[in-house]
Amino acid sequence: MSISSPATAAGPAANGLAVSAGQRSWIHGPLLDSALAWCWLPIALSLHWLEPHPVALRTVIGIIFMVSFAHQPLTLGLVYGDPAQRSAKRWLYRIAPVAAALAVLIGINVSLTLVALIAGLWNAEHTLMQRYGVMRIYGRKAGDTNGGLEKPMLIAWLVTALTFLGGYVDLQGLLLKINMGGTNADSVRLLDRLSTVAAWLFWPSLIISAVLMVRWTRVERTSGRGIGTAKDWYVAATFGLVLAVMIDPIAGIFGYVAAHSIEYFGIVHTSLRRRAATGDVSPVARSTSTAWRRAGVYSVYALVIVAVMYVTLEFWGGTLYAFAVLYFGALHILYDGFVWKLRKPATAASLGISSHNPAVR
């Protein structure tokens, strides 16, 4: 999920924004928000503990890959089940499925290694931008417009983590641990050639990250909201996740992947639960307007995903599955940039953000 909206680096003290009396600071509630923000931690700890047990480790990683695949087609339902969403970018939603299929087919036949590397880096950026999007939901609820500072800060965190992995971590050894050869091994060998460059880039990236963190902390502390807000808790979880990737790459990376999917399911569920109550009459809102309807839709969706995975894994030695992962992944990342825009009143309302909050505009 990539939630976008116009923002500046100025804090509420400078721009005069205020939160309405009834505005909730949490998205789902304190307990569930905290569980989603930190869900990566028990996953990463479990993977760290399983590293001496390769069979169990690979089993859990396989499950994480399946969960990651399962969340991607959700975005297609949000687009094609909502006439208002389709009409906003009608030409794109008609052309993109065909264009994505052709691009993936060409990429697989030219260099699956290169495609896998690009897809991995794109997903890393996309996953962090979901964290940015959720951060902005909290920011909008609090009445701030600090996104112009927060986005480069998160990007600097990601670049710091990636350059550290590329420059100072034995990636070949990690692959041997989790028994992922073939295309993944080729991708790592390609990255190994850039290890010296990555090692040099790590230090300026680290300095930039530190500077931006200090600036962000100062802006947040001068807002008058105090320390320990819902947004602070979420930013701390995100920073911890990036650190985990650097401290234990296997545990951190797959915790990163799993948390992204789990959080996306949570955000989509909350959005669907509120859409009918906000007057949304789209097919996707009507079909999920009650708890029983949502349960039915989720059950059918799960069965379809299992069927797709079973069929694609059985054909052409997994090549069809690789195509499905890349195809749905590309559409998911592309479409998310249009689905989750907080400047749209319907989207903001479905995430519990008051249209009277000036920061939404």
Image: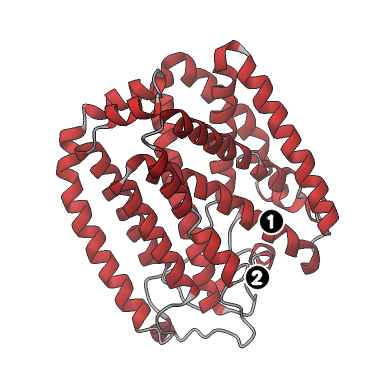
Q: Is mark 1 on a helix, strand or loop?
A: helix
Query: Can you tell which of label 1 and label 2 is closer to the viewer?
Result: 1
Residue 248 higher or lower than 25, as above or below? above
Q: Determine which quarter of the picture holds residue 331.
A: top right
Residue drawn at x 72%, y 39% as measured from the top left: 302
Residue 319 location in percent, x, y?
A: 55, 17
Q: Which residue is the site of mark 1?
A: 269
Q: Nearest the camera: 310 or 196?
A: 310
Residue 71 in sight: yes
Residue 211 x, y percent position in the rendering: 22, 65
Q: In this view, does 352 lie to the left or right of 206?
A: right
Q: Which amino acid does label 1 sit on?
A: His
Outermost residue toward the top in this view: 316
| Circle 2 SS class | loop
**18 is higher (above) or lower (below) than 50:** below
The spot of residue 167 in percent (x, y) is 20, 38
Could you say which is closer to the camera, residue 145 or residue 138? 138
Residue 361 in sight:
no
